[in-house]
Image (cartoon, helix red, strand yellow):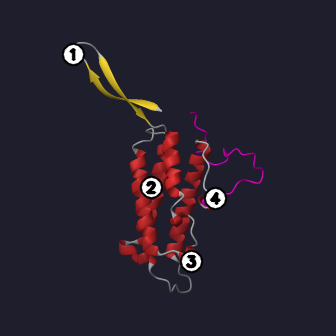
């Protein structure tokens, strides 16, 4: 745990008030616990309700914004939180107002399924940053949530330095 200065008193002597602040590992653990209960990130695509997915992405984005305040500024955790928020924002923006861009299910020849594309992009981005958090802070990822993590290379020695942003944090 880090300590944060919350006040100073000078009259009659010098004094300072300190408050214990969570470390980045605690914040990363809380984020993973929250995300492992979000079916949006790993549920079957053919069963997804588009508007529930947009609502869930909004909830994830709001939660990540709250957690950003507890993360060390400019650290790898805050960088990953910002990237995950951006991924949620892109998904929500792809949906359009009231999710109207995701409601079209009768795609003609050459037309893309915007919902599936946006969902795949969200899951890929989130998977990379979940892997960053798990590796950097030595945390386990729930089995269902781990389905969106990037694949391990063939010569897996357990070291993820082959992916940008992967460094273990010192406690």
Q: Residue 88 in the image: x percent, y percent?
A: 45, 60
Q: Circle 3 is placed at which residue position?
A: 46
Instruction: Select label 4 or label 3 by which is in front.
Output: 4
Look at 32% across and 22% down and name the residue there: 16
Choose mark 3 or mark 2, whichever is in front. Answer: 3
- Which residue is the site of mark 4? 143
Q: Is residue 94 visible?
A: no
Q: Looking at this view, name the residue that lies furthest to the top.
A: 12
Residue displayed at 50% across by 74% down: 114
- The earlier-in-sequence mark between 3 and 1 is 1
Report how far apart the C-alphas of labels 2 and 1 lie in the structure: 45 Å
Q: CA distance from mark 2 to mark 4?
A: 22 Å
Q: Secondary structure at mark 3?
A: helix
* Residue labelled with disc 2: 85
Magenta: main secondary structure: loop
**Marked residue nearer the N-terminal end (4 or 3):** 3
Residue of label 1: 11
* Circle 3 residues within 10 Å: few <14, some 14–19, many ≥20: few
The answer to which of 27 and 92 lies nearer the viewer is 27
For marks 4 and 1, the one nearer the N-term is 1
Earlier residue among tags 2 and 4: 2
Residue 39 lies, in percent from the top left, at 53, 66
Callout 2 secondary element: helix
Q: CA distance from mark 3 to mark 2?
A: 24 Å
Q: CA distance from mark 4 to mark 1?
A: 57 Å
């Amino acid at each position: 745990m880090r300590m944060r200065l919350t006040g100073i008193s000078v009259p009659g002597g010098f004094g300072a008030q300190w408050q214990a602040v969570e470390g980045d590992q605690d914040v990363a653990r809380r984020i993973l616990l929250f995300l492992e209960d979000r079916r949006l990130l790993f549920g079957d695509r053919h069963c997804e309700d588009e508007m529930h997915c947009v609502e869930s992405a909004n909830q994830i984005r709001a939660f990540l914004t709250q957690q950003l305040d507890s993360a060390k500024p400019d650290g790898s955790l805050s960088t990953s939180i910002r990237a995950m928020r951006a991924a949620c924002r892109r998904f929500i923006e792809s949906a359009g107002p009231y999710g109207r861009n995701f409601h079209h299910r009768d795609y003609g020849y050459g037309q893309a399924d915007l919902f599936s594309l946006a969902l795949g992009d969200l899951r890929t981005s989130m998977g990379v940053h979940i892997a960053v958090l798990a590796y950097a802070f030595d945390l386990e990822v729930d089995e269902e949530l781990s389905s969106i993590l990037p694949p391990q290379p063939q010569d897996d020695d357990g070291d993820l330095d082959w992916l940008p942003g992967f460094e273990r944090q010192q406690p």
